[in-house]
Amino acid sequence: MPAITPHHVPVSGSTTSIVKENDVESLSSSTKISSAGDSKLSGKDDEACQNSYDTLQGTPTTTTTRSEDGISGFSISIRSDPKQSELKLIASKRSSALSSRTTQQVLSELTINKFDMKSVGLIGRDAEIATLKSCLERVMTAPSDKNEARQGTQTTKTSQGHKELVFIKGLSGAGKSSLAKTLENDINRKGQGGAFVEGKFDLTSSDAPYSGIAAAFGAICQFVLDKNNEVSAASTSIAESIVSSLGEEVQLLIHLIPELRDVVASYMDTSEMTAQDVDIEYGTERWKYAFRTLTRVFNSHVSPLVLVLDDLQWADVSSLEVMDYLISDVQNPNQLLVIGCYRSNEVDENSILYNRIQTLKGKQAKSGFSITEIEVGGCKVEDVNKIIMKMLSIDDDATTRDLAEVCFKRTLGNPFFLIQFMTMLQSEELLTYNLGLLKWVWDVVKIETATMSAANVVELLQSRLRKLPLQAQLFLKYAACLGSSFNLSSLQLVWEKHAVRRGRAEVTDTVEKLLALVLEERILEEAGVNKYRWVHDKVQEAALSQDELDDEANASFQFEIGEALYYSLDQEELQEELFTVVDLINKQCDTKRAEFAQLNLTAAEKAQSISAFQSSAKYVANGIGHLPPNGMWTANRSSTLRLYTLGAELEFALGHVETAESYSNEVLNREDCSTMESLPLKIAKIRKVCVYDSRFTETVNLSLDLLNELGCKLVWNTTMMPMQAIATFMRTIKMAKKAPAPQDFYTTLGAMEDPKQQKIMAILSRLCFAAYNDDNMFLNLLGCCKMVQMTLKYGVSDGSAPVFAGLGSLVSAVQQDYATATTFAEMGLAMQSYRRTPRASETIGIAYMFVLPWTQPLQSCLSPLEDGYSSAMRVGYTEWGMNCLVANRILIPYMMGRRLNSILEEYSEILSQLEELKLSDQILSLKMWSQMILNLTNHPTTGTGEAHELEGEIFSSKSFTGKNVIHVATIHFLEGELLLFADYQAAAQRAIKGGDKFVKLFPGMMSGMIETFHRAIALYVLARQTGKRKYRTQANRLRKTIEKWHNGGNPNVVHYHYLLSAENAALTNKHAVAEE
C-alpha cells in the first residue's frame, strides 16, 4: 500500500501534534490478527515497528505487511523529537467483508486529527473576566442577613450593596454567554451554597411571555431538588418558606414554572391547581410581589445567586419588568447578581431593552444596586492565533501566525465565527491532519482564494449544513421551528406527522438516527432528559433559513409545523406548548380559521393570567386576524365577542386608546349587542378614565349613566342630594343592625350570584372612589349605602367587605357609636375571612385605622395591619397595602410612644416602596411625618426653619399649595405636635383658634385621640399659668370628649383620661384627687 501523503503542501514551520493515549488504544484495539480476535501483533508487524524505530528525525516509515489470515495492511511507526519517548502506532487494515471495523471508523475515533476545543477556553478576555469577577466579589463580600430574608414579606429592611446588575453586550458570537459562564466555576468552587442559573430568550418566540425568566427559575427549582437529594432538610426548608411566604400565589407561579410544583409538593396539594384570573388593574403588581418573594426565599437559602438572562434583545416587556423587579428589590438583603446578555447591533434607542436599561440606571442609587456594562468586541489577531494554537495543539505561535492572519481577516476576530470558519476549512480539506507527518497542514494561499466569498457566520453555517444529508438538513429546519430548546416528543411528532406524512422523498431515517448525527456534528446538544438545544442561536438561525426560501415561504413552512402540532398534541400537551404552537401558527396570520382565532384567545387569556398584558394584546390582535369574515358574529359569536372585549380592556390598560376604542366600537355599534354583552367594554372605559387618567368628574358621570342604563338610579334630585344622602345613611344603619352577627354573616347571606348585580356593585365601587376624590362626599355616601343594601339583598360580592368596614368608620366618625361601628367593621372582616378578595387590605385598613382602635388596644392592630400590607402586595392592591404599612410602622408606633429614632429608621424603606409604586399622595404624607420627627429630634437635616415649624429639606409647609384634605389635615396635626413640644403658650392659643379642625377634616382617624389629648394638655398648662377661664373651658371640653371615649371602652385613652382628670383637679386645688 502506498505511503500516506498530505492533502496539501505543508506550510514551513508546521509542527507535530502529540498523539494521545486513547488514540494508541483505538488503533491498537482495531488490529485484528486472526478470526479468533487475538490482539497480538504478527512478527511482520513487529518487524515493521522496528524499522520505524530506526527512522531519524520523526520521518515516517510505511511498511506493507500481511497478517496471519493473509489480509494486506500497513503500519506506521514514528520516532518523535529525541527528547520525547518513542511512540508506536500500528494500524492494520482489513477488508470490509472480514472486519467489523473499517479504517474510516478507526480514524473517526482518533482525537489527534480533531480540534482540541476543551483547551481553548476564553482567550483575549482577561479584562472583561476581571471586571465580571470583581462584580461577583462585591456581591459576595457584602453581608447577608438570611434569617431576616426568610421572613418573606415580614421584613422591609433596605438592602444596600448586595445586588449587582451586569449587562454584557456585543455582536452575536462574540462570547457574551461564555464570558458570563466563567462565574459558574467560581460559584461552585467557593462552596458557600451559591447557585449559577441561566435562562435564554428565543429567536422564534419573542412574543411568548417570560420564556427566559421561566427557564431561569426552573433551573433554580432543579438546583433545589438536586440539593434535596444531598440534604433533604435544605429543600424542605425552602419549600416550607415558599408556601408560607407566597400562600395562594404559589398556584399562580406554578403555571409559569412547572418545576416549582415538585419543590412544594410535600407542603401543598398541587394536583387540582388551575390558572387564576388576574385583574388587569392590579395584575402587574401581583406578579411583581410573586417573583420578588420567590426570589427572596430562594436567595435566602442559595446565596450568592447568579442569574443569567441571555439574548435579552428578544425578551418580551414583561420579562424585562421582572428583571427590574428583582434587582431593584430593596427588601431582599441577600447576595444577588443578575447578568443580562444582548446583541448590541440589535438594540437601539427605540428598543424596549434600551429604555429599560436607562430606567434602571436612574433608579440604581435609590434601590441599592450597581450597574456595570461590559462590551465584548472581536479578538485581536494575537488572540486569534492563540485560539488556533489551542485548537490544533500547537505550541509555537510562529507556526500558526499566517493561518491566524487569514482567519482574522475572514472573521474579524469573532470567536464563534472563527471556530465555524476553522470547521469549514477542515471539512473542505483546506486544513487537514496528516497522519503520516502527524501534524496539521494547510496552504494559506488556497485558503484565501477559496474563502473570499464568505460574507457572515450565517452563510458560513449554511454552507456547513448543506454538506449534511438532505434528511438531516430538513430535520434541523423542523427543530429550528421548535425554538432554542425543545423536547424529543415534539420533534418526533412534527417529523412523523408532517415530514413523513407529507411524503417527502428524502425522509427515510428515524429521529434517533438523525439526532445522533447532528449531536455528533455539534449542531445540537443535550439539555436534560430527552431535551435538546442549539449550540448557538446563529446555528438555529442558519438551520431555519438554510434552504433559502423567501420570507413568505418560510412563514408558510413554520405555519405548517404549528398546524401539525396543533392537530397532534393532546389537550394537556397543547397547554404546555401553547405559546410555541400559537407563535408558529401566527407566522401566517391571513389564515382565516375560527379554530386558530380561538387558539389565540386561549393564549391571550393565559398571557393575561400571568400579567403579560403586552403579549396578551398581541395574541388578541392575531386572533382577530384569524376570524373568518363570514360568520364572525354568527357561528363564532362567543369567541369574537371575547376577543374584542379582552382586546379593549387590554389596550385601555396599556394606554392605546385608539386601538381600544376601535375594538369597543366593533361591539357597541352592533344593534344585536345586549346590555350585558357591552357592559365589560363600558366598565373598561370607566376604569381607564378613573385609574389611568384620574378624571374623576368624568368617571362619576359615566358611572351614573351606566347605572341608570342598568336600572339602578342612585341620585333622584341633584339639589336634594345632601338630604337624600343623610336619610339613606340613617335607613341603611337600621337595615345593617338587623343583619346576622359577624360570625354568621357570610354563611347566612351567601355569595352574590347574579352577574348583573355583581357588575352594578363593581360600578358603584368605582363611583364611590371617584366621588371621594372629586370631593363629592354626599354622592360617596349614597354609593356606599347602596352597596350595603345590595349586599343585604343579593349576597356578598368582592366589594361587600370593605364597604361594611367603611360603614363602620362613618358610624364611628359621625355618630360616635363605637359599639355599632365595631360590629359593622367585624362584619366586613368576617366576610373577608370567608371570601378573600384583592380588596382585603382595604377592609383591614379601614377597620384597624378608623374603627377598631376606638375599642381595642393599639398593640392588637399591628399584626392585622402587617397582614393587610402583605395581602395587598400579594395581589397588587398596593395603595391600601401601603396605607397599612405606614400605619403599622409610623403612625401607631408614634401614638404608642416608641423612640422617634427607631420610627425614623423605617422612613427610607417605606419611601423607596412608595416611589417605586408612584403613590404621590402617600409619598407627600410620609415626608410630612418624617420632617416632623426630624424636627423633634433636632436632626441635622431639619433645615432652616424654627423647631416648631414643619420646615426642612424633606418638606416645607410654607411651600405647600395643595388642597388634598388629608394633606391639609396632616399638616395641621403635625404642626400642632411640633408646637406642643416647643411652646406651650403658642400651642394653647393655636388650640383655641384652630378648634377641632383636624378631627373635622379627618373624622374617625385614630390619630385624633393623641391630637385631642395634646391640645388639652397645652390648654391646661396655660390655664394654670394665666388663670384665664377660656383656656380652662376649652381644656375641660376636650377632657370630657376623652372621658366619653374612655367610658365607651376605648383602652387607648385610659392614661389620657386619668392625666387630664388630674390636671383638672390640680387646677381646682383638689390636690388629693390629682395625686390619686
Image: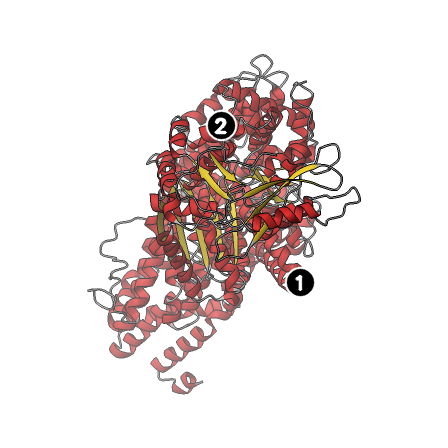
Quarter of the image for residue 1060 reads: bottom left
Could you say which is closer to the camera, residue 881 or residue 314?
314
| Local SS, label 1 | helix
Question: Circle 2 sits in a helix, a strand or a loop, which is it?
Answer: helix
- Identified by mark 2, the residue type is Ser
- Res 1014 quadrant in image: bottom left
Q: Is residue 887 above or below residue 982?
A: above
Mark 2 neighbour class, 10 Å CA radius: few under 14, some 14 to 19, many 20 or more: some
Residue type for callout 1:
Ser
- 815 above or below 769? below
Give the spatial CA distance, label 2 vs label 1: 51 Å
Residue denoted by label 1: 232
- N-terminal-most mark, 2 or 1: 1
Q: Position of residue 96 (x, y in %)?
A: 71, 32
623 or 687: which is nearer to us?
623
Question: Callout 1: 10 Å neighbours few (<14), some, many (20+)?
Answer: few
